[in-house]
Amino acid sequence: MDDLDALYDQLDAYADSIRAKDRLIEQQAKDLASAQACCDSYAVEKQQFSDKIEALTAEVMELQRDAESWRAHMREIERVQDMVRGGFGRDGALAQGRVMAEWQPIDTAPKDGSEVLLYLGAPWSKIEKARWYAPWSNWQCGVIPSDPVREEYFGIGSSVPTHWMPLPLAPDAVARDNEPNNSGRHCPLDGGVE
């Protein structure tokens, strides 16, 4: 009977071991379920973050399009401001419908051959109508020479203009009467040859 009691004791110990393993498996199953829930939660959060990133990317792209549109509007506003202030566009060409502007520093004057008013500082302190003549790198009054090598020099000379402004628009009748005729007039504002 001792053998039988020993066998029962072994069976009880074996059953206890199996129950302990069952509890361990049950705990591991709970841990696994908890880990799966965390993974599922992470997957949901990852998808939510992915959706947010996609929405923010779309918003940034929209803002970039808006910014480019606003930059284009600002360029147009600056172009119009340039015309109003100086009568010239960014390319230096006279703008249609220009308005009288304030004196501007000479370094902002157009050098495309357009006529402008120049202010010559002391000791001359006078205003001249002139245009930039590239072959001589100087401001010229009146008729521009057709041959810069052989023709007489009619430039401003040693006078250095300090400021400029665009010519005002003439009324229609005056504009027709004052069309340039290349008659040899040179600097009538300073007593030049007529």
Image (spheres, rainbow, N blue to C red):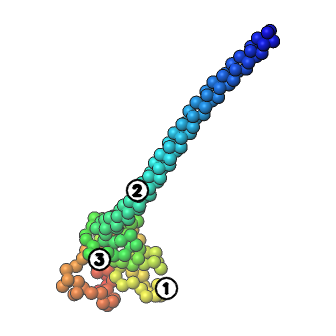
What element does badge 2 sit on?
helix
Query: From the viewer's perspective, is residue 157 above or below residue 53?
Result: below
Give the residue at x 29% y 81%: 188
Give the residue at x 41% y 61%: 65
Indicate the position of residue 164 as horizontal and vertical percent values.
33, 68
Say which of marks 2 and 3 sits in front.
2
Q: Quadrant location of the N terminus?
A: top right
Lower sequence index among marks 3 and 1? 3
Lower sequence index among marks 2 and 1? 2
- Which of the numbered marks, if any, corresponds to residue 63? 2
Q: Residue 193 vs residue 8: left or right?
A: left
Please say whether residue 171 is visible from this viewpoint. yes
Query: From the viewer's perspective, is residue 51 above or below residue 22?
Result: below
Give the residue at x 18% y 85%: 173
Identity, as a three-letter code, of the amino acid under mark 2: Leu
Indicate the position of residue 31 as horizontal and vertical percent values.
59, 30
Report the residue marked by disc 1: 149
Say which of marks 3 and 1 sits in front.
3
Report the residue marked by disc 3: 96
Q: In which quarter of the image is residue 107?
A: bottom left
